[in-house]
């Protein structure tokens, strides 16, 4: 295999001590910024860019790759411990992860996230090295109707996260969809629900919403009840994963990788939607569906593997076609151009050392990521021993810093507070928060893809179903909707009577 | 490159909001800085007065002349877009060139992103009268002022210099049925709805304005043009490669590499002259009366005194002549389009009218 020997050469490049150092710095930096909500890997790389022009391109990109992977993982730490996602890709992790932490299983949650990220990152990188050209050919064929079909499937899957009361779940979903419509509508150029505030013209970022609803809302709720409920002491629990945890984690890791990688590779894929799909898949397939919402380890293992696999997938179109699919990849593309390197179909021929060095350093970065974070997991988990008033003050502090740091704007702090109040209100009236977050993730994407598909077909409804991929997805949807009720009916052998 | 601006902005929206009200701390710091500058000017005037023994008439001119020798201190550049965007890259490259050429001490480049750049524009308007701040901007901001119904407009600002421009490419997939612009235009005229055109800008951005102006020039009603906005250059490029759209209008840098490898075909470029290294005719040479390029420039806040404006123009002129800037231009593949002061101002006015005209026709501006 030619690619394999090239890869070995890449390892020789990446294993150079200086390059190893840059990989380490990148991973460390990435993990640190992943922890802070509001500052993502894209911004960090952009700000580091002028500094790195003094470096060799290979070294700079090795460091950037470390930041990219580190950021994907780092976001999960605060998601699990503090219910404050640092990155949009780790919003879903907070759902089960934080519940696990409250049950004293924080270390296990962090460990399954770290190992899952490692496994997904490694498989993803391997896939990047071996099948990139093939994957990218398929990815290009995906269009708006295909994306929309997947969205429809995702919306059907939403029903599994609505909670015990379907009406309340749907109400929460509607709140999410409503918040998702805020901003300038890209198709018509009209402003929607911006109240004339220019700060709202670009919509509200899903991280700000998640931090507001999850973290701030919860801090307010706890504060309101602090005097009434006795302080429960959260035990730190076992520092490592039990046999049972391993048994329940390995399948979600692999499934998460399988979901995340292709999504990362297709433009408009991103990491939010596949993490959500991984979550609902695990919930459907789990032998313990009743544990979901109470801290099921599968709900952490799956999405965490997914977001790292999608990070690897995101490099496929970047390296093979020069197409960025995420903000981070877009900034990296700019960096390539700054070095006078043009990613594209010819990059492998013109810069083999750079490409394979980068791929190899992704492997190394992954190992560093695991080595750095696994021992830290029990230490992080001890954070939860902090008495509640201080802990929640700390959460509020980090949430505010994250919201403010992105743009040094007080408006964001008010926005965070308003969303926090909304989160508090939702808790007060028993509305689940998760469907609202899902609504914000799915709503805007689904809308854009639907309208784009119809625009391209010049308004013909057939434009939604005229690709083979979309057709397959709709058939799957039909089966999902039709088969289970029929099966139940057959099982109970209830004769269907009209007017019974 | 214009598309990257939009790419990054749309992927990380809403995290970037400007301070419209909470500037108090910066303001007081500002006052201090201004007081210092004032003090420097006074001492310069006094020194001159002593040397020239009482010839106070031309003291003012000489004071500003005195301030422009030696590196300029404490300059800030506002980028109305997120880090990594096209504006950001340009501003940071210009700042670096100024520093390296010892024209300034460290320049602080900061981002106030949002609403296509109008949040940053509003912030600049709030800095009225400040003499230590410049804003990076470009064609995208001109359109965004209209589509966002921004209260602050570019007419309020003091134009300093246009730096670079980039031609837009009219591009089709490699085995598109249209092998020339004529064929494309013929099909487009016959049924505009069936010939969707993609771009990586929102309404009012360069990629949106290009097909609209082209439509007008060839006799297609802009209102009938089926423009499909994509979320950044990457998504757009995939749509072209996957033949989801009939053609696209986008910055030449976005597609130059793919054109070289033969994955896409550039039917025409919108600049006055052919673009180096791109095998495509200009619209003019195809007898279509349209020249339209995406550009980036620098403006100062409203109320900037004339002598300070002169000083900024001088600063950017020197920056433009520096080796560092020339290297940056080649490295980034940017086309030099340097233009200063009043010349840039009248250019800005004509661009503004042109954009307003198109958007009015589309009903996006009343």
Image (cartoon, coloured by chain):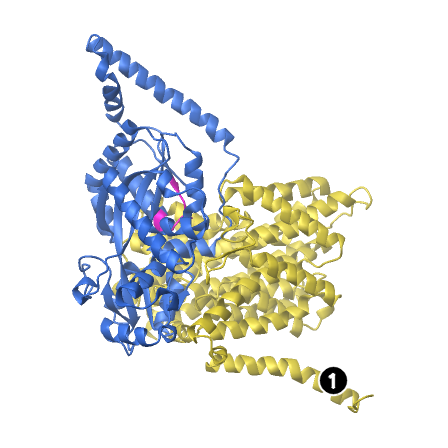
Chain colours: A yellow, B blue
Give how far across and how far down residue B273 sits, in percent: 17, 57
Apparent side of residue B153 relative to residue B272 in the rendered image (left or right): right
Give the answer, above or below, for where A76 lies relative to B95.
Answer: below
Predominant secondary structure, magenta span: loop
Q: Quadrant of the N terminus of chain A?
A: bottom left
Instruction: Count residues near mark 1 (Cα–Cα under 10 Å), then give few for <14, some for 14-19, many for 20+.
Output: few
> Where's residue B19, x and y in %?
50, 39
Residue B118's place in the image compared with A144, above or below, is above
Where does residue B39 sit, x and y in percent of width and height? 35, 17
Q: Residue at x 53, y 70 (%)?
A: A259
Residue B101 or A153: which is nearer the viewer?
A153
Q: In which quadrant is the C terminus of chain A drawn?
A: bottom right
The residue closer to the viewer here, B129 or B214, is: B214
Helix, strand or loop at mark 1: helix
Q: What's drawn in magenta, residue-wise?
A: B78-87
Q: Quadrant of residue B222?
A: bottom left
Q: In terms of image quadrants, where is residue A496?
A: bottom right
Percent across and percent down for residue B203 are: 41, 58
Q: How many marks?
A: 1
Residue under label 1: A488
- Residue drawn at (65%, 62%) of the image: A174
Residue pictured at 43% horizontal, 76% vertical? A457
Name the chain under label 1: A
């Amino acid at each position: 295999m030619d690619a394999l020997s090239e890869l070995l050469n890449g390892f020789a490049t990446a294993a150079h001590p200086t390059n190893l150092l840059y990989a380490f710095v990148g991973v460390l930096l990435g993990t640190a910024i992943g922890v802070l909500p509001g500052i993502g890997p894209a911004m960090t790389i952009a700000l580091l860019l002028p500094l790195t022009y003094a470096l060799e391109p290979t070294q700079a990109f090795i460091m950037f790759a470390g930041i990219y992977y580190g950021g994907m993982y780092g976001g999960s730490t605060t998601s699990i411990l503090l219910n404050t996602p640092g990155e949009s890709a780790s919003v879903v992790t907070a759902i089960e992860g934080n519940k696990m932490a409250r049950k004293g299983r924080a270390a296990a949650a962090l460990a399954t996230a770290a190992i899952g990220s490692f496994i997904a990152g490694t498989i993803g990188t391997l896939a990047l090295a071996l099948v990139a050209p093939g994957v990218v050919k398929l990815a290009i064929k995906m269009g708006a109707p295909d994306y929309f079909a997947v969205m429809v499937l995702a919306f059907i899957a939403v029903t599994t996260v609505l909670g015990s009361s379907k009406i309340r779940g749907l109400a929460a979903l509607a709140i999410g969809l409503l918040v998702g419509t805020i901003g300038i509508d890209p198709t018509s150029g009209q402003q929607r629900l911006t109240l004339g505030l220019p700060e709202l013209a670009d919509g509200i970022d899903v991280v700000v919403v998640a931090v507001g609803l999850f973290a701030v809302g919860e801090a307010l709720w706890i504060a309101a009840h602090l005097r009434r409920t006795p302080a429960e002491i959260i035990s730190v629990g076992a520092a490592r994963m039990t046999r049972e945890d391993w048994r329940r984690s390995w399948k979600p890791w692999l499934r998460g990788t399988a979901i995340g990688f292709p999504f990362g590779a297709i433009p408009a894929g991103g990491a939010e939607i596949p993490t959500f799909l991984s979550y609902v898949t695990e919930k459907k397939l789990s032998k313990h569906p009743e544990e979901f919402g109470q801290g099921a380890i599968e709900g952490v293992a799956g999405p965490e593997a997914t977001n790292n696999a999608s990070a690897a997938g995101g490099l496929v179109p970047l390296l093979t076609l020069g197409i960025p699919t995420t903000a981070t990849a877009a900034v990296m593309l700019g960096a390539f151009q700054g070095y006078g390197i043009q990613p594209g179909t010819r990059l492998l021929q013109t810069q083999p050392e750079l490409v394979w060095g980068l791929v190899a350093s992704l492997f190394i970065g992954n190992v560093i990521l695991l080595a750095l974070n696994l021992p830290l997991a029990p230490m992080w988990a001890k954070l939860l021993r902090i008495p509640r008033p201080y802990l929640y003050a700390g959460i509020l502090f980090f949430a505010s810093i994250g919201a403010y740091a992105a743009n040094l704007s007080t408006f964001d702090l008010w926005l965070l507070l308003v969303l926090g109040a909304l989160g508090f209100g939702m808790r007060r009236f028993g509305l689940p928060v998760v469907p609202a977050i899902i609504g914000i993730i799915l709503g805007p994407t689904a809308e854009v893809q639907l309208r784009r598909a119809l625009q391209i077909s010049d308004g013909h409804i057939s434009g939604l179903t005229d690709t083979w991929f979309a057709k397959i997805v709709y058939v799957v949807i039909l089966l999902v909707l039709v088969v289970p009720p029929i099966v139940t009916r057959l099982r109970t052998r209830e004769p269907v009577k009209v007017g019974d | 490159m214009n598309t990257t601006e939009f790419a990054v902005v749309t992927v990380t929206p809403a995290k970037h909001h400007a301070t419209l009200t909470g500037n108090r701390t910066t303001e007081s710091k500002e006052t201090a800085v201004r007081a210092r500058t004032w003090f420097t000017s006074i001492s310069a005037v006094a020194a001159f007065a002593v040397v020239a023994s009482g010839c106070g008439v031309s003291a003012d001119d000489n004071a500003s002349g005195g301030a422009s020798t030696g590196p300029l201190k404490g300059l800030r550049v506002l980028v109305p877009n997120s880090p990594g965007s096209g504006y950001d890259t340009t501003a940071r490259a210009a700042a670096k060139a100024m520093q390296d050429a010892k024209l300034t001490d460290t320049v602080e480049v900061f981002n106030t992103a949002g609403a296509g750049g109008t949040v940053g524009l509003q912030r600049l308007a709030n800095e009225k009268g400040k003499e230590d701040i410049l804003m990076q901007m470009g064609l995208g901001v001109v359109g965004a002022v209209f589509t966002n119904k921004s209260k602050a407009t570019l007419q309020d600002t003091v134009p300093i210099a246009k730096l670079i421009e980039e031609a837009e490419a009219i591009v089709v997939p490699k085995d598109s049925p249209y092998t020339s612009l004529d064929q494309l235009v013929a099909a487009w005229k016959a049924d505009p709805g069936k010939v969707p055109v993609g771009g990586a800008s929102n309404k009012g951005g360069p990629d949106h304005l290009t097909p609209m102006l082209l439509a007008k020039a060839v006799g297609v009603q802009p209102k009938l043009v089926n423009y499909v906005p994509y979320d950044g250059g990457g998504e757009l490029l995939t749509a072209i490669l996957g033949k989801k759209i009939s053609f696209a209008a986008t910055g030449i840098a976005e597609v130059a590499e793919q054109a070289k490898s033969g994955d896409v075909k550039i039917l025409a470029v919108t600049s006055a002259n052919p673009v180096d290294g791109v095998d495509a005719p200009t619209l003019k040479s195809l007898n279509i009366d349209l020249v339209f390029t995406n550009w980036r420039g620098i403006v100062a806040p409203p109320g900037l005194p004339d002598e300070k404006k002169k000083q900024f123009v001088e600063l950017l002129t020197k920056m433009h002549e520096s080796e560092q800037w020339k290297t940056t231009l080649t490295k980034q593949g940017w086309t030099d389009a340097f233009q200063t002061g009043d010349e840039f101002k009248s250019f800005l006015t004509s661009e503004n009218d042109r954009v307003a005209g198109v958007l009015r026709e589309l009903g996006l501006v009343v």
